[in-house]
Amino acid sequence: MTGLVEAVYRLKKVPRTGWLVRGVPRCSVESVAEHSFGAAVLAWEMARRLREKGVDVDPCKAVLVALFHDLPEALALDLDAVASRIYGRDVKSEAERRAAEEIFDEETKGFWEEYEECETPEGKVAKLADLADMAIQAVEYSKSGFERWREFVESALEGAREIGGPYEEVFLEILEEAGVIDREGGGGRAGQG
């Protein structure tokens, strides 16, 4: 059995393969752990803003959900969209579920399940923080010449539309502040060609 602590340190060595297979140099590719940290910080900010808008969400719990959301990839690895399609979503989901069984106790497994189910306010926030981190990271890579960043931003925007409501609104605020989108004038990094 792989413990939680061991999984954390394994996750620091697992690259985000979506960036690798799309041409970001290996020396520049973030680890899944780095991504999880970014998502956790964004989850805090999103949850705080949602709470100010009257949404009943716990920012601390949203951070925990975001921190644990990809931890099973320490064992199951990070599969990009093509590999996920080849193996099948069911196979990927089952591998991550089995990895979660190896890593988590009941309490921490609950945080991961909230992310997977995306039904609680904290699960929705963590999902959007995950997407926001991906979009912001894509724009960061574009500053070094990464040309395929738009597909990541579009994917993130699509995921936010699926959740909708005040969650999507806060998500868009964050992306606008990060310079990823410009809802007013069509500018922002996503509006540049």
Image (cartoon, grey):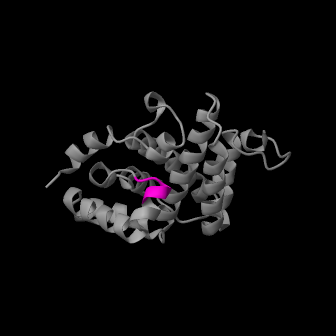
Query: Which quadrant holds residue 148?
Result: top right
Quadrant containing the C terminus is top right
Residue drawn at point x = 60 percent, y = 34 percent: 140
Residue 49 appears in the picture as rendered: yes
Left or right: 37 with respect to 189?
left
Q: Between 126 and 25, which is closer to the camera in this rendering?
A: 25
Query: Which quadrant holds residue 72?
Result: bottom left
Residue drawn at point x = 64 percent, y = 30 percent: 145
Residue drawn at point x = 78 percent, y = 45 percent: 182
The residue stretch that appears in magenta: 79-83
Q: Looking at the image, which residue sits at the far left?
A: 1
Left or right: 192 with respect to 56?
right
Q: Position of residue 83 (x, y in %)?
A: 43, 57
Q: Position of residue 149 (x, y in %)?
A: 63, 43
Residue 115 appears in the picture as rendered: no
Q: Between 114 and 13, which is closer to the camera in this rendering?
A: 13
Q: Main secondary structure of the magenta part?
A: helix
Q: Looking at the image, which residue sits at the far front?
A: 86
Query: Which quadrant holds residue 13?
Result: top left
Residue drawn at point x = 44 percent, y = 28 percent: 27
Is 21 colored magenta in this rendering?
no
Quadrant containing the N terminus is bottom left
Q: Position of residue 28 (x, y in %)?
A: 48, 30
Q: Position of residue 128 (x, y in %)?
A: 55, 57
Q: Between 58 and 26, which is closer to the camera in this rendering?
A: 26
- The count of marks equals 0
